[in-house]
């Protein structure tokens, strides 16, 4: 359904400008010497024409011109039918680890201690929302891997399916190779200009039938770039145990070497997330490496209407000018 709107409605604040100008600014002062006219008595004897400035109604055409100019400046436009969704030609699969180690509570979110999956959900959801124009898919993996969301422009649905996932949904182990292979299967048949897989895991490959490095080589053959993110805090010492040399390594199961090799084989990049700030910085870096389609294209077809009031103001101004010239000639 068509509707009328103004692109710059604040321009209507200029409407009282002529009144403010007339009300507050002092009249112009003429400092030049007065001209002595020898036939002034004859000029004063001429009767004013009908419609001279003594008639207050002469101001209304000028006010109408000003109103039309302000109306044109506000850029009225007619909104039409919705345009097709703009696309950037990129297909992006997200592979998220749901193995048992993702419940380890070594992450901070808004000042509270949370497990790794909770942090991934919170920050990855914001990342998905920013991927305007991309088709997003979601692979969840544990002991097995499966497609939770096929490639789609419905980013809200993908974020919702991610939020509904839970640890152990796909088993307690980690099948990284199977997750990569499943993502390849979904991406290789798509004629996208750019195909990307973002793999998030906190462990090593302990399940599945496909080697992660073999799957990475297959992804490279199909032109699929893989960005890997390893999650896990640094080595910490429990309270009161520092003097005894007792330390815990929350990331002892993280296979950084394999994740780095997967990224290098496919032309991607490996990132390490030790906390929430690291995760946020990683997602911002991914936005730079694989930029999404930026806003700028209107969501609905627009028909500009400003030429009409602008043209009418021009015609009315020409008419008023012609009237002034005609009156001046009549006085001569």
Image (cartoon, rainbow, N blue to C red):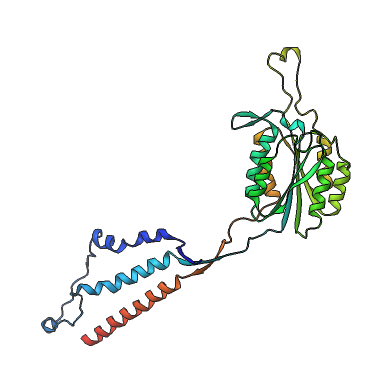
Residue 258 visible to an observer of this rendering? yes
Q: Is residue 55 left or right of residue 313?
A: left
The image quadrant of residue 134 is bottom right
Residue 284 visible to an observer of this rendering? no
Q: Nearer the viewer, residue 28 or 62?
A: 62
Q: Horizontal and vertical percent for residue 300?
A: 55, 63
Q: Is residue 112 left or right of residue 78?
A: right
Q: Horizontal and vertical percent for residue 57?
A: 22, 74
**Residue drawn at (15%, 80%) of the image:** 37
**Residue drawn at (45%, 70%) of the image:** 306
Q: Is residue 311 left or right of residue 105?
A: left
**Residue drawn at (64%, 60%) of the image:** 86
Up/down of 88 relative to 129, above or below: below
**Residue drawn at (64%, 43%) of the image:** 125
Question: How many numbered marks does the figure carry?
Answer: 0
Q: Horizontal and vertical percent for residue 129?
A: 63, 48
Q: Is residue 71 left or right of residue 190?
A: left
Q: Horizontal and vertical percent for residue 276?
A: 65, 34
Instruction: Check the picture and name the quadrant holding the C terminus.
Output: bottom left
The image quadrant of residue 180 is top right
């Amino acid at each position: 359904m068509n509707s009328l709107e103004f692109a710059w409605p604040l321009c209507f604040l200029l409407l009282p400008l002529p009144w403010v100008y007339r009300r507050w600014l002092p009249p112009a002062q003429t400092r030049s010497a007065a001209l002595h006219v020898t036939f002034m008595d004859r000029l004063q004897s001429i009767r004013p024409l009908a419609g001279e400035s003594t008639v207050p109604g002469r101001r209304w055409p000028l006010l109408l011109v000003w109103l039309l100019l302000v109306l044109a400046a506000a850029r009225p436009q007619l909104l039409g039918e919705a345009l097709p969704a703009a696309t950037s030609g990129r297909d992006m699969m997200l592979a998220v680890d749901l193995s048992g180690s993702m419940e380890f509570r070594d992450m901070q979110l808004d000042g509270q201690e949370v497990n790794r999956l909770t942090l991934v959900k919170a920050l990855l959801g914001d990342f998905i929302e920013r991927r305007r124009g991309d088709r997003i898919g979601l692979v969840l993996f544990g002991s097995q891997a499966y497609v939770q969301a096929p490639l789609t422009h419905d980013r809200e649905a993908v974020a919702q399916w991610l939020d509904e996932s839970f640890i152990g949904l796909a088993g307690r182990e980690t099948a990284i190779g199977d997750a990569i292979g499943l993502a390849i299967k979904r991406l290789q048949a798509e004629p996208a200009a750019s195909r990307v897989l973002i793999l998030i895991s906190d462990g090593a490959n302990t399940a599945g039938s496909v080697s992660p490095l073999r799957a990475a080589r297959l992804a490279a053959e199909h032109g699929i770039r893989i960005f890997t993110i390893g999650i896990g805090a640094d080595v910490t010492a429990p309270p009161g145990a520092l003097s005894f040399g007792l330390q815990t390594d929350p990331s002892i199961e993280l296979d950084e070497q394999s994740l780095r090799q997967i990224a290098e084989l496919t032309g991607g990049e490996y990132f390490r997330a030790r906390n929430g700030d690291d995760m946020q910085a990683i997602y911002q870096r991914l936005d730079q490496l694989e930029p999404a389609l930026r806003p700028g294209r209107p969501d609905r077809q627009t028909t500009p209407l400003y030429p009409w009031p602008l043209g009418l103001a021009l015609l009315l101004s020409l008419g008023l000018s012609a009237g002034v010239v005609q009156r001046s000639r009549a006085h001569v």
